[in-house]
Amino acid sequence: MQAVVQEIVGQMGNEKAPLLQVLLAVQDASPRNYVSEEAVRAIARSMKVSRCRVYSTASFYTEISLKPRGRHLIRICGNAPCENAGRTAIMEAIQQELGIEAGETTADGLISLEKVSCLGSCYKSPAIKVDHQVYGNLTPEEAVAVIRSLREGGEQ
Amino acid sequence: MSMIDCQLVFNVENREYVDLDLYRSRGGYGALAKVLAADPRESVYVLKEAGLKGRGGASFPTGLKIEMVRSNQEQERYIIINADEGEPGTFKDRYIMTHLPFQLLEGVTIAAYLAGASRGILYVRHEYDEPRSVMRESIAQAKRAGLLGENILGSGFSLDIELFSGAGSYLCGEETALLSSIEGRKGRPQVKPPYPTQQGLWGKPTLINNVETLSNIPKIMEKGALWYRSLGTEDSPGTKLISLSGDIRFRGLVEVPFGASFRDIVYEYGGGPKPGRKVKAVNIGGASGVLIPEEMLDVPLEYGACARAGITIGSGAVFVLDDTRSILDNVSNRINFFLHESCGKCTPCREGLRQAQIIMEKLIAGQAVMKDVQNLERYTRVMQNASFCGLGQAAGNSVISSLHYYGEEYCSRCKDGEEDLYGEESA
Amino acid sequence: MAMVEITINKRTISVPENITIMEAAKLNGISLPSLCNHPDQKVKANCRVCAVEVEGVKNLVASCSTKIAEGMKITTNSPRVRETVRTIVELILADHPQECLTCIRSGECELRQLAFKLGMKEVQGVKNTKRLPLDFSTPSLVRDPNKCIKCGRCAEVCHHVQEVGILYSHNRGLDIGVTPEYGKELKDVACVLCGQCVLACPVGAIYEKDETDKVWEALGDPDKHVVVQVAPSVRVSIAEEFGRPSGSIATSKLVSALRLLGFDRVFDTDFAADLTIMEEGHELLQRLQTGGVLPMITSCSPGWIKYIEHFYPELLPHVSSCKSPQQMFGAMAKSYYAKISGIDPKDIYVVSVMPCTAKKYEAARPEMRDSGYRDVDAVLTTRELGRMFKHEGIDFNSLEDGEFDLPLGISTGAAAIFGATGGVMEAALRTVYEVVTGQTLEKLEFEGVRGMEGVKASSVDLGGTEVKVAVAHGLAHAKQIMEAIAAGEADYTFIEVMCCPGGCIGGGGQPYGTTNAVREKRIQGLYEVDQKSEFRKSHENPAIQKLYADYLQAPLGPVSHKLLHTTYTNRCQHELQ
């Protein structure tokens, strides 16, 4: 872990590295999409700041997870336009499909489901984001289809 | 081409991705060449004459802001492009970055030159993967073309722009919170003064502008202040990008010259409500904006007129609720949003929102009494009056405006709701 | 100083420019409320209870963070201000456990006082009933996250005054908590237990682990011979618990009050401080003569010791092996005193009264039982002792004067100044000078090591040899010196480090309201004690001379080595580098 972190921090400027970008990069490098306690320690050591500072910053931002997540992240937009457009039905359909609630990860560690404040895609509400891709104007059935294709892809 | 030849600033109806060649073939980067060859003071004067104001929400005069950074003794200065577009219902900066990246970059380069900044940071919200990758590629292209980096267009002026990704915090759109975030801390707002123009990033003078604001600059420099002023009104020159969403026929981005009414925006640009529906309420300015009834739609899109009507244009989100919608559900959604996004630093925002959420839930469950509504009003008033930053100050706007225009919806949900909300004094 | 004219509540006044509204109001007889503001800290503007109206500004402004300007019209007493301030306090109260009657902070809680001042009658908001577990993990401190009002004062002191960086605000919104990372317990992080956070906290969210019940029990046990020792700095702070001005010297009242509590003997840690000087002074000489590790660093301050064990374990050989005065006293009480009084050491119960929360931890260290028994059985902070006096209805200020018992109550002025930053250095220099030169020191005051400057460097002429010394107080300053030593840039011979700002008079166990201004007054009190002392050099203490003659034989001798010296532990599993 220290080596992975040291490389990221080194590429970003060592002690002058932007902590938030380091955290995101360390998270991206983690197969479970999170920043482990070991990683927090390693970042603190590499950047010569206190662990408390690293943890504090990490804990503030919702896009940084301090707990292991699935390999794929499904984010469901919870803003008013998406709620109006049927976000709740989409959420329920996906929860049923995956057998988990928002904030949880499937038992196989493949998928985590999250509710987020806003995806900035209100022109195609209701919107969800699967990893880096936004899907909009969805019906619950279409949302489930997106999840199924993800699962099939993930299991290959 | 001629039909749509740059009538406005963005011409978004094209829905067209303008690559570097296309952008240059239409005169792009001409403004930068002009500015690099001219006296910067004159260019700043043009911006001030044009009356360009910040489009992120605070509507601070852009020319003046540039001048404030420019006049600072400290030579190490920064420009930060605020692309942390987090206001629910807003997607204008997303569009600019994915469709008009070079218009933005040219605007950034001009502003940086005028402010005397040689390092720039483009702060893009985490959710915007596509805009981020388009911008990364566009920055690289601009560099290769000598339009960014060392010695831009042979002028001796250099500017480097780095991408910085947000990490899921609405509050980081607030400029001091954004600075904290870049500096590696929690995205909490800081005490002002000092303002970022005096002591910003790493304590150095910093120009922070919104994507839309900066993207206005090339056109202003190219066509002049008079042309720009001809687009809007005396009070508010130019145009505004409006993000339309909710219960209307056309959802998407439109560019509206200042002076058009919200009725025009909803009915002309947005095509009005869906068949058989009526407009019940319009939310202007996103989660932090107000809710207004249909009768108020004649207010023009104009900073002065909106301020007088109690409307904040904010980021330019227009979200329509038709007559099937519950006001309380909408308000509750927004309170939950703010509770999730509040940094928790100051008491009124953190604790006021906690109470507001509890009361909204009671109202929706039919468990509230009129006293709760009065408390809700008092808590939101105190949040507005005493919160540390704009988030808390604006978080209660939906409550206060909806209590004003849709008070009966609150009363009807109260167990003792036959009483009038404001007692006997109320009209 | 340039003045500006402003208006407060329709009254036009002239005030110095560049001050805040809160300061301007204070100069004009109005104390605006605040919970997050602290005189020694930077402005945070978190709590917002200091909100006032300024003409021409749409919202209210925080008076703590808003500077005045010429012609500013301020209103502090409008209905709008009143509603706002009262509502904010109501919001805090709704989130705060209503346990005031049994809260350790009850009488001195800033929130409770503010609620009382505002005449809060009712909390209409829905009360937060969620309860988080309390942290009882250390011998020194208890952290109650439920009572935290998120003002940030503890984090500020932990990060900027001590630079230990344990308490910090995490998460956001309602989940915000001022805790160690991952919400860990204090025992699992590099907390030095200095208790500066306790002094900074406006409420009862972090406080000393109360040992008064243990002491009551011992006092009530007929088989126990209970002796008490009082640290130097307690004599200039305890009277504050009874409304006396900061720095009031209350040694003799303190002795009488302790006797009223029922202690069998009332002794003085100052006796052991003199003993420390004898041992530490000779250790320094030995290091100088034998080429030992230099600079030598003092070891009296347990928070400091825990700090260096966590953060600079590689520098531990620099630290004097002397136990602190508290522990030397305990070791002597259960050996020498047991012998001369004919009491079985197993029946002797040693209570110490300390300005310090880390002393509770120190007394519980496994190293601290060289006599075969725990050197010190219970440690009370100044605050706890104040509570015991109050519990017994002792009218402290009107007590007859009393005197310490013999012989462990005899001490010098050199020992008294241990409680002030620079005091241990000064006391040591008084003795070392005379031992080295064989001459009488004419001027006893070493001004170069006195005062509130964070790092004080000075040099002393020891009979023709210049010796460079340094004094640091507050761990942020100690850290500067450690960095210099680690970099090989510190050419000092002897360094005094005190964990807390101002030294022990500013310790985490001192009365609430310990600010830097209060610290300076207490320091003056201690210098006055020294000035008025019959003996002012540790080696002249007749009880110490007799102790060596009858029992210890010589400094650094085998008995001393066994009872008065200790070892340290590398705790760098918490280390950051």
Image: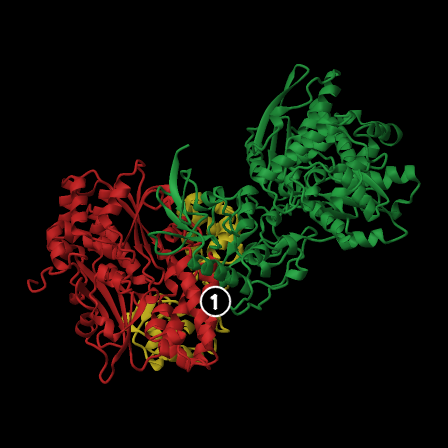
Q: What's the colour of chain C in the image?
A: green
Q: Residue B328: x, y in percent?
A: 38, 76
Furthest residue toward front: C11
Colouring of the image? by chain
Q: Seen from this angle, which residue lies furthest left?
A: B2
Q: Is residue C524 visible?
A: yes
Picture colour for chain A: yellow
Q: Position of residue C378 (x, y in %)?
A: 77, 48
Q: Nearer the viewer, residue B248 or B144?
A: B248
Query: Amino acid under label 1?
Result: Arg
Task: Please name the residue that numbered disc 1 is placed on.
Answer: B354
The quarter holding residue B251 reads bottom left
The crowding category of the residue bearing disc 1, from other C-alpha atoms within 10 Å (few below 14, some 14 to 19, many at least 20), is many
Q: Is residue C178 left or right of residue C407?
A: left
Find residue C27 and report its horizontal and vertical position in percent.
48, 41
Q: Is residue C321 left or right of residue A85?
A: right
Q: Residue furthest bottom?
A: B276
Residue B112 falls in which quadrant of the image? top left
Q: Which chain is red?
A: B
Examine the rendered structure and indicate whether residue C149 appears above or below residue C12.
below
Q: Quadrant of the C terminus of chain C?
A: top right
Residue A110 visible in the shown view: no
Percent position (x, y) of residue C370?
81, 42
For this rendering, which residue is in front, C334 or C52? C52
Quarter the N terminus of chain C occupies:
top left
Secondary structure of the residue carrying numbered label 1: helix
Residue C509 as seen in the image, left or right of residue B387? right
Residue at 46%, 64% in the rendered image: B352
- Chain of the residue that carries numbered disc 1 in the rendered image: B
- Across the whole image, how many numbered discs are drawn on residues? 1
* Side (left or right) of C333 relative to C75: right
